[in-house]
Image (spheres, rainbow, N blue to C red):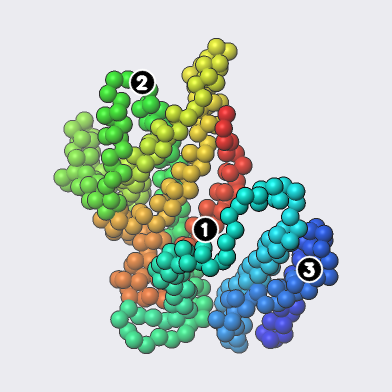
Amino acid sequence: MQNEFLILSFVVTALVGTGLLAYAFSRLKRPPALGAVIGAIAGATGPLLFMAPLKFCTFEEGRKTLDFIFGLALFAVGAWLAIWLTRWLSQIIIDRHTPGEQSKENTIGTFKTSLLTPTLLLAPTIVILALFLYYPLIDTFRLSTLLVRLGAPRTRFRCVSNFTELFSQDYAGVLFNTFFIAIAIVFVGLVLGLAIAYLAYQPVRGANVYRTLLIWPYAISPAIAGIIFFVMFDPVAGIINHSIELFGGQGLEWIRDPWLARFAVIVTSIWKTLGYNVLFYIAGLQTVPRNLIEAAAIDGANAWQRFRNIVIPALSPITFFLIVTNITYAFFNIFGTIDYLTRGGPAGATSVSIYEIYVLGIRSKDLGRAAAESIVLFLLVIGVTFLQFRTSSRRVTYGA
């Protein structure tokens, strides 16, 4: 039954590739039959990108239903990638062989050289990227399919069990912590950063001094920020509880209460990135056209209306950039803060994905599951960033 379904899956992906590439070639004014043949080949061979290294293990007899569904998803993703890449390359080749008048004009006076010169110039960078980026990435995919213990020489092939077992455990709680803390850091951090930058931008005496002081916290590493706020949030000797008790309140268990611990991590991370956000917003405020603000003031717009309708739209490119960089920080660079502030506690309330990878790989010595979880985190960040580009980039306006 699995073999018949596998053959049917290849036929379906080949037919999908045939239809999509035939339509694409007709749009590019090329023979649809040629596109159909190329699409059929891409649709049929694309799934091999993932299924061949896995030896089609998800379709074996006795596999769990979740393994089968996961393998089917990989099958479809491989086909989609191959079809999309083939269509993209075909369009580039066709465009190069049919240059229009505009492209002919743009090529006048360009420097012509062989492929050897740019290859030699890029060789050092390519070698470094291959050794320290591409090879570790490929090796992480390899480890995610194995049962690997830290320090043990022997390994065993596990197919996709390292991935599917994540969903059978309390991984939903880790994902909740990851997204909740990340969203809070990005949203509150950007709003607070814009407000402080707008105040710091006002022409007052000594502005350069306190602008510099606002930016300084960004120079501190996440680990040091975690230590500083661990001392501040200490229930017994911390300055925060001392200040609360000084005004007649009762001290709080900042590190031992789940929601208060999340709040402590969020506050620490916002303080750490605040200088970065303020720096870019101050730079962006210097590009806001003053004549538009003055014209709006003459037309009767108050300060809030001018800020909402002129300043915020003018800062949309800066905001878009900061959203992407803050998302990356909230998903990856928060590890040092959590490790020194809460250590993932209490009861895993602040254990986000990047910290859970450390717990699995180093403390539990399960490199296979840690590699699988790192790939899931990598795909989540790519998905969130892609969604951000597709939704927010349309609202970004450049220029006045």
User: Left or right of 15: which side holds 248?
Assistant: left
Of the two numbered discs 1 and 3 on the same chain, state the one appearing first in sequence.
3
Which residue type does callout 1 highlight?
Ile
Tag 3, which secondary structure?
A: helix
Which image quadrant for residue 248?
top left
User: Left or right of 142: which side holds 88?
Assistant: right
Of the two numbered discs 3 and 2 on the same chain, state the one appearing first in sequence.
3
Tag 1, which secondary structure?
A: helix
Give the vertical position of 61 relative to 202 (above or below): below
Give the vertical position of 38 relative to 315 (above or below): below
Give the vertical position of 344 relative to 232 (above or below): below
Which image quadrant for residue 26?
bottom right
In percent of width and height, residue 163 lies at 49, 72
Q: Say which residue label 1 marks.
A: 382
Q: Residue at x 36, y 20 (%)?
A: 203
Image quarter hosting the C terminus: top right
In percent of width and height, residue 166 lies at 47, 70
Q: Say which residue label 3 marks.
A: 35
Q: CA distance from mark 1 to mark 2?
A: 40 Å
Q: Residue at x 58, y 76 (%)?
A: 50
In percent of width and height, residue 24 lies at 77, 61
